[in-house]
């Protein structure tokens, strides 16, 4: 029997993304966000939801751009820290030793040590309760070459992206390969 848990943000899992932006003074900053996902395949777009009071938010609006650096398992502590303090009070890059890199396609920084980066141009903002959903058109995806499958696609078993479990506030990473998508279910097609 299933137990009702109420109207809560308990979707499983949620991503652990470092959202990169230059602040209003041009200083590189990154914050952790777990409310986000792919929004469209044409144009390739994604969303991330941010509270308007966050330091990163004003920079995204000013520069009309943000990046998503996918947080890997081996940088879990650094990633967690990015979500614990405000860039208005701390230089998160100096504190963690992470390296901001200026995107060559949008006006936002990404994190060099994170293996997968998505660079987005801000196309829309939508107020959703206490958050603003930022929609970004994907302008480029960059991935460490040694983390690719066949030189073409990111390999989740090598990237080991962190995922977040809301409610208990735990970090996890992905498990093993289960099967090929759009193939395993063919046994039910007639």
Image: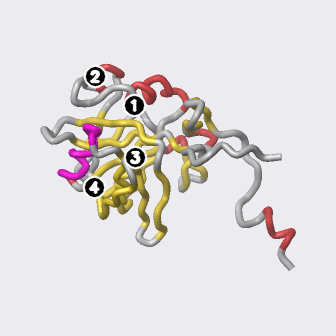
Helix, strand or loop for disc 3: strand
Tell me the magenta residue range: 53-62
Q: Which mark is residue 83?
A: 1
Q: Position of residue 87 (x, y in %)?
A: 26, 30
**Residue placed most toward the observer, 177 or 39:** 39
**Which comes sooner in the sequence, label 1 or label 3?**
3
Single out the mark in the foreground, 1 or 3: 1
The residue sitting at 39% across, 56% down in the picture is: 128
Q: Nearer the viewer, mark 2 or mark 4?
A: 2
Residue tagged 4: 105
Residue receiving disc 3: 68
The image shows residue 29, relative to residue 50, as above or below, that is above
Q: Residues within 10 Å of mark 3 (few under 14, many from 20)?
A: many
Left or right of 178, for residue 153: left
Would you identify the image quadrant in which residue 8 lies?
top right
Location of residue 47 with respect to 59 vertically, above or below: below
């Amino acid at each position: 029997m299933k137990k009702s848990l109420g109207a809560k943000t308990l979707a499983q899992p949620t991503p652990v993304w470092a959202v990169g932006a230059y602040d209003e003074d041009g200083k590189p900053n990154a914050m952790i966000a777990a409310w986000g996902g792919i929004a469209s395949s044409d144009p390739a777009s994604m969303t991330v939801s941010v509270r308007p009071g966050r330091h990163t938010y004003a920079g995204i609006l000013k520069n009309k751009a943000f990046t998503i650096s996918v947080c890997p398992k081996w940088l879990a502590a650094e990633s967690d820290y990015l979500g614990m303090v405000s860039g208005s009070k701390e230089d998160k890059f100096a504190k963690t030793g992470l390296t901001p890199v200026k995107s060559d396609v949008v006006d936002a920084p990404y994190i060099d040590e994170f293996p997968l980066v998505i660079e987005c141009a801000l196309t829309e903002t939508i107020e959703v309760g206490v958050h603003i959903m930022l929609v970004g058109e994907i302008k480029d995806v960059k991935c460490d070459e040694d983390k690719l499958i066949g030189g073409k696609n990111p390999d989740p078993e090598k990237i080991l992206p962190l995922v977040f479990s809301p409610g208990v506030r735990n970090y996890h990473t992905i498990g093993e390969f289960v099967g090929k998508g759009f193939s395993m279910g063919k046994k039910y097609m007639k």
